[in-house]
Image: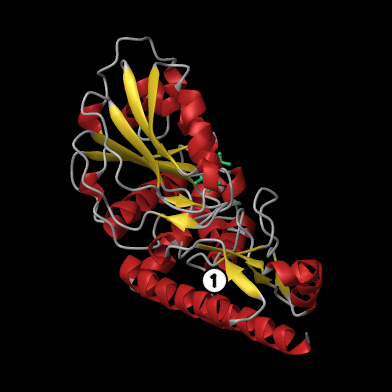
Amino acid sequence: MKKHNFAAGPSILSPYTIQHTAEGILDLNKSGLSVMEISHRSKDFMDIMDETQQLFKDLLDIPSGYSVLLLQGGASMQFCMVPYNLLKTKAAYLDTGSWANKAVKEAKFFGDVDVVASSKDDTYSYIPRGYSVPSDADYFHITTNNTIYGTEIKEDMDCEINLVADMSSDIFSRPMDVSKYAMIYGGAQKNLAPAGVTFVIVKDEILGKVDRVIPTMLDYKTHIDKGSMFNTPPCLSIYAAMHTLRWYRDQGGVEAMYKLNLEKAAILYDEIDRNSLFVSGIANEADRSIMNVTFVMKEEYKEKEADFLTYATERGMSGLKGHRSVGGFRASIYNAMPKSSVEVLIDSMQTFEKSI
Ligand SMILES: *Cc1c(COP(=O)(O)O)cnc(C)c1O
C-alpha cells in the first residue's frame, strides 16, 4: 500500500509525475529507448529541456530579462556560486536557519558578509523583523522557507539592492512576483523532482559585474550561453520535473496549489493548537510554514513522542520524525501531498489523544 509520505526531502511527488516518468524510463515517446539512455543533444531531450524551462516561465510568470537554468550541484552549490558571481566587496544575509547559515559560511570565502539579523539564539523559531539592509551591499540573501525549523517568509519583500532567495522548499507553493528578485534558486527534491537538478532563475543584467576569474562551470554566463547544455544535464531529473510542472499547470497553476496548501496547513495547525498533547514550536502564526509543519509534544507528554511515531507509522504514515536539531515531528506537506493524507494525520493525532 502506498504510504502517506511526509518526508522533508527527497519527498513526495505526484502520482502523475511518478507514472509518466516511469513510462519514459521504459520507453520514451514510443522510441524504443529509455529517457536515461538517449543523447542530451537529441531532439527528444531538447524538447524536454525546452518545455521544462518554458513551464517555469509560464507558471511563475517570469518577466523577460531573466534566464532559467537547470544545473547540478544542489542548492548547496549555489551557496558558493552566488557569491562567486555576485559578491564584489560585501553581501548581506538573513540567518533564519541551518541552510541560511551554510550559505553565509560560503559567502565569507568571497568577501565581507553582513548578517543583518539572526534567530539562531531561539533555535530559529521565528523570522526576524525590523532589521535594515545596508544599501552598499552587493545583494541581500534570504531563505524563504526554512525546511528544518518550519518557518517561512511568505511575502515577496521590497529590497533596494539585488534580492537573492533560496526557495528550495517553497518554489511553486504560491504565486509570486519574480520581478522583486535578482535571483531565485533551489534543489529539486522538495517540490519538483527527484534529486539531481538545481533550478536557477537569474536576472541577466546582474551578472558580469565582479572582477574575479570564475571557473567555467561555476559561471552562470556559461550556462546561459549554452542553454543549460554546456555539459550533460541531469536528464532524468529534468524529465521528472517537466511532468511535475505539467501537472501543476493542469491543476490550475500555482494559484490552485497555493489554495490547497493554505487549506492543508490551516487544518493541521488548527489541530496542533487544539490538541492537548501537541504544541507548535513556531509561536508567531505569520511565520508558520505552509510546507513544513513542525510540532512537538508538550513537556508533560514528552516521553510519548516515540509512541506517537510508532502509532502514525502503523497507520501508513512515513517521514514524520522531526529533524535531529529540533526533535518532535515535522509534517512536510508539499504540493503533491493530498489533503486526505493530512486528514489521516489529524485523525491519528485525535485518536492518539483519546488513548492517553
Ligand atoms: C534541502 C535544502 C537545501 C539543500 O539542498 P541540496 O540540494 O541538498 O544542496 C538548501 N536550502 C534549503 C532551504 C533546503 O530545503
Question: Which quadrant of the rendered structure holds the N terminus?
Answer: bottom right
Task: Say whether residue 204 is left or right of residue 347.
Answer: left
Q: Position of residue 73 (x, y in %)?
A: 54, 34
Q: Position of residue 181 (x, y in %)?
A: 26, 42
Up-down relation of residue 240 to residue 201 (above or below) = below
Colour basis: secondary structure
Q: Residue at x 61, y 44 (%)?
A: 37
Up-down relation of residue 38 to residue 34 (above or below) = above
Up-down relation of residue 198 to residue 295 (above or below) = above
Q: Hey, what amino acid is under mark 1? A: Met
**From where the camera sits, is residue 210 visible?**
yes
Residue neighbourhood size for the residue with mark 1, other residues' Cα within 10 Å, grouped as few (<14), some (14–19), many (≥20): many
Q: Identify residue for label 1.
A: 337
Q: Residue at x 38, y 41 (%)?
A: 142
Question: Residue pushed farthest front?
Answer: 300
Image-quadrant location for residue 318? bottom right
Q: Position of residue 259 (x, y in %)?
A: 36, 75
Front residue of 104 and 130? 130
